[in-house]
Image: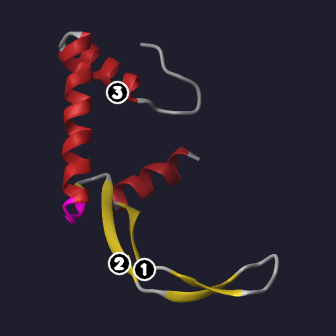
């Protein structure tokens, strides 16, 4: 099983599903795409996504505020927006800490 260096890709996930579950490469890639599409749809509908043992993708609405251009020092309004944050689960944090 080959893996790209430094980055886990959709193809890597599909290859793992292919290897461990025995699905065809096309079925494996379709499964990965379906899962990612479901997550994107939920987030764009305003839902948070929680993957037990991995972490949560949480949406936050930020209010308008005044910011400052660091180069010129001029104050500029920053528009309200929705941002997504990721919060790792305790299991993931422990696994990462143990790996180092």
Mark 1 is surrounded, within 10 Å at the Cα level, by few (under 14), some (14 to 19) or many (20 or more) other residues, namely few
Q: CA distance from mark 3 to mark 1?
A: 35 Å
Q: Quadrant of residue 80?
A: bottom left
Which residue is found at the position 25% from the left and 58% from the top?
A: 43
Q: Are marks 2 and 1 in contact (CB under 8 Å)?
A: yes
Disc 1, SS: loop
Q: Main secondary structure of the magenta part?
A: loop
Q: Where does the image place residue 93, in percent across and percent down from the top left?
A: 44, 57
4 sits to left or right of 34: right
17 in relation to 88, above or below: above
Q: Which residues are magenta?
A: 45-50
Residue in view at x 53 percent, y 44 percent: 99
Residue 66 location (% of width, % of height): 58, 90
Quadrant of the rendering where the N terminus is positioned: top left
Q: Which residue is mark 2?
A: 61
> Label 1, on which residue?
80
The verdict on residue 48 being magenta is yes
Q: Which residue is mark 3?
A: 13
Query: Mark 3 or mark 2, which is nearer to you?
Result: 2
Decide if residue 58 is on the left or right side of residue 65. left
- Residue plotted at (49% across, 20% down): 3
In the displayed structure, 91 sits above or below 10; it is: below
Q: Residues within 10 Å of mark 3 (few under 14, many from 20)?
A: some
Q: Position of residue 69 (x, y in %)?
A: 72, 79
- In whole angstroms, how far apart are the C-alphas of marks 2 and 1? 7 Å
């Amino acid at each position: 099983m080959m893996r790209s260096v430094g980055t886990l890709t959709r193809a890597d996930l599909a290859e793992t599903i292919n290897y461990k579950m025995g699905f065809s490469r096309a079925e494996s890639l379709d499964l990965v795409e379906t899962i990612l599409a479901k997550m994107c749809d939920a987030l764009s509908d305003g839902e948070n996504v929680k993957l037990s043992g991995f972490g949560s993708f949480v949406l936050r609405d930020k209010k308008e505020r005044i910011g400052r251009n660091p180069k010129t020092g001029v104050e500029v309004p920053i528009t309200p927006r929705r941002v997504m944050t990721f919060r790792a689960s305790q299991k993931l944090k422990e696994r990462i800490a143990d790996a180092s």
